[in-house]
Amino acid sequence: MPTEKPRVTFTVDQVTLSKIDEYRFSSKSKNQTQAILSLIEKGLADFESDNPSLSDNNRNSSYTVDEQSLINKYRTLDGYGKEAVDSILNIEHKRCAGQSEAPRPMIRAAARSGDITQIEEILPEELPDNTPLP
């Protein structure tokens, strides 16, 4: 898949490559590139925490590595994907913000031809008796 992002090529010794592969499998990274990017992000986060004056100029300094990863993934979604994520996020935010003791809702989404037609919360007590719960 072509990308507009800059490409960087570098060489590592066998010991470093083994450590990268070990991290890749322990973190369940999809591929070597994802593992290397994750390690770079973690290293940069550590660097910025050790050098607060540098991170003040970084617009993403208030985000954790995981949050920045989610932001990066979100930015690659098309309109349908963003709409789906936004809908689920709004449902979950509402559930967590005001209903800490409420039963866990199931979320049902119906999609047709790339357009979301319906996303809704369904509480377990609203299901017919024969409906299996996840």
Image: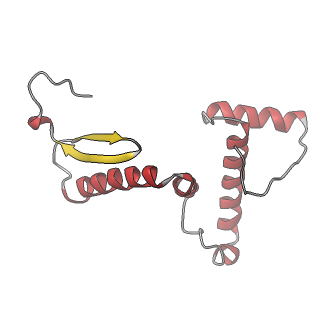
- Report the residue at 46% width, 55% height from top: 79
Give the percent coordinates (x, y) of residue 23: 69, 36
Quadrant position of the C terminus in the picture: top left
Q: Residue at x 39, y 54 (%)?
A: 83
Residue 31 in which image quadrant:
top right
Q: Nearer the viewer, residue 114 or 41?
A: 114
Q: State the image quarter where residue 16 is shown.
A: top right
Residue furthest top in the image: 130
The colour style of the image is secondary structure
Point out residue 67 in the picture as x, y percentages from the top left corner. Answer: 52, 56
**93 left or right of 73 in image:** left
Q: Relative to 59, is 101 above or below?
A: above
Q: Is residue 8 above or below residue 25?
A: below
Q: Is residue 41 or residue 110 the one in the foreground?
A: 110
Which residue occupies the extreme front position in the image? Answer: 113
Above-or-below relation of 98 to 129: below
**Residue 80 horizontal side relative to residue 75, left or right:** left
Q: What x and y, as percent, mark residue 112?
A: 35, 40
